Image (cartoon, rainbow, N blue to C red):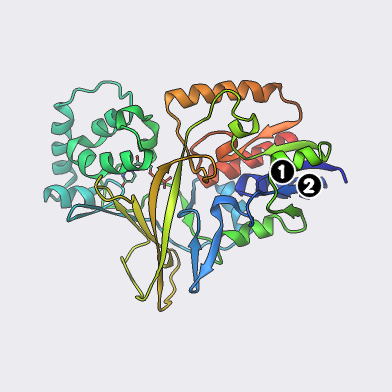
Amino acid sequence: MNYDYLIVGSGLFGSVFAHEAKKRGKKVLVIDKRDHIAGNIYTKVLEGIQVHQYGAHIFHTSDKEIWNYMNQFAEFNNYINSPIAIYKDELYNLPFNMNTFSKMWNIQTPREAKEIIDSQIAELSIQDPKNLEEQALSLAGKDVYEKLIKGYTEKQWGRDCKELPAFIIKRLPFRFTYDNNYFNDRYQGIPIGGYTKIVEKMLDGIEVLLNTEYSEFVKLHPNIADKTVFTGMIDSYFDYCLGTLEYRSIRFETEILECDNYQGNAVVNYTERKVPYTRIIEHKHFEFKSQKKTVISKEYSTEWKPGMEPYYPVNDKKNSELYVRYQELAKEEKNIIFGGRLGSYQYYDMDKVVRAALDLSGREL
Ligand code: UDP
């Protein structure tokens, strides 16, 4: 059997592309090394609760086309992400906003908050922030940086804030209003019924082979498709011939608890360096149901090693340069397209992944 496209990975990128290709009459085969579809957005029901098996995924976008596209596959609820941060015995609202500042300095007005932050920034004299630490300090001052950013970031990335790119912290809003919405985007929500169902719908009528590793599969079926869309790790495709790109992985400790409400919020970040996990997710709060029990997941961030699941590309200087060299190799390769968070080695949000897959579909199909 010969296919127009072999799609490696049934995550969001691969599934959107597969869906679009089938819609345009292409013959498509999707393979995935895991025993389930949906990649890292996979959700599974435990105690009647949709559990985000590979970490919390909150869909948010300002791109109306992408929002409408996703709404073909699911109805979204009105969840708004408003995480809590715990630092020692202090509790703050995230993202950095007037609720955070008023609690931190016992003040009430934006003017008071600005005065404190400006005076902290003035002591530092940072002109052009070159790394995450400088960026965070010049945005929020010393108190916010030390209590809410430094410990959390160094746990999550396993690197000093001075070695990390500034763009990571720019993902978070910083505002002088009493607004705890973590995102600035126009549209936001959690798909009712879970993410796995979305991917099931995208892949409806498409052949999918699970438990199928690309490198072995392609040896057995070298001419199976005219083109391949590869959404795995780009360095693994090339057998790490230029060296390994670095990724962060996460170990989840998931527990079912005999209580109906453990922490009162879906996301609670532990920003102190000493607490070994970065955050606790209480999955039921993504939906608004009233199950008797609750399911929580503690997230422990670790350096990725072979055999683990990669989650975050480490977009520091060294890795970015290595990625460019892999891109050069990719250009020489015939009939293969790399995409998704791993294939493009980019810290993509879901909406950007869908956008990239639709853009590729537009160019390619
Ligand atoms: N961050 C932080 N303190 C927090 C939450 C986030 O300093 O309490 C920083 C940290 O550097 C992190 C980045 O913001 O890597 C992005 O956080 P986000 O919540 O977007 O990460 P994700 O949900 O993708 O894991």
Q: Secondary structure at mark 2?
A: strand
Establish whether ligand 1 lies closer than 8 Å to the Cβ of label 2.
Answer: no
**Relative image position of residue 41 (x, y in whole percent):** 55, 53
* Residue type indicated by callout 2: Val
The kind of residue tagged 1 is Ile
Give how far across and how far down residue 295 sits, in percent. Answer: 42, 67
Residue at coordinates 71% horizontally, 43% vertically from top-left?
Answer: 7
Residue 141 drawn above or below residue 350: above
In the drawing, does residue 98 fall left or right of residue 313?
Answer: left
The residue at 34%/75% (across/down) is: 259
Q: Which mark is residue 242?
A: none
Q: Residue beneath label 1, please?
A: 7
How crowded is the residue under tag 1: few (<14 C-alpha within 10 Å), some, or many (20+)? many
> Which of the two discs, 2 and 1, labels the residue nearer the N terminus?
1
The residue sitting at 14% across, 51% down in the picture is 108
Residue 28 bears which disc, if any? 2
Q: Is label 2 in contact with label 1 (beta carbons under 8 Å)?
A: yes
Answer with the quarter of the image where residue 134 lies: top left
User: For the residue labelled by badge 1, is the local secondary structure a helix, a strand or a loop?
Assistant: strand
**Marks 2 and 1, how far apart in space?**
7 Å
Name the image quarter holding the C terminus. Answer: top right
Horizontal side, residue 62 vs residue 231: left or right? left
Q: Is residue 69 visible?
A: yes
Ligand 1 in which quarter: top left
Characterize the local packing of mark 2: few (<14), some (14-19) or many (20 or more) Cα atoms within 10 angstroms. many
- In the displayed orientation, state which residue is furthest to the right: 1
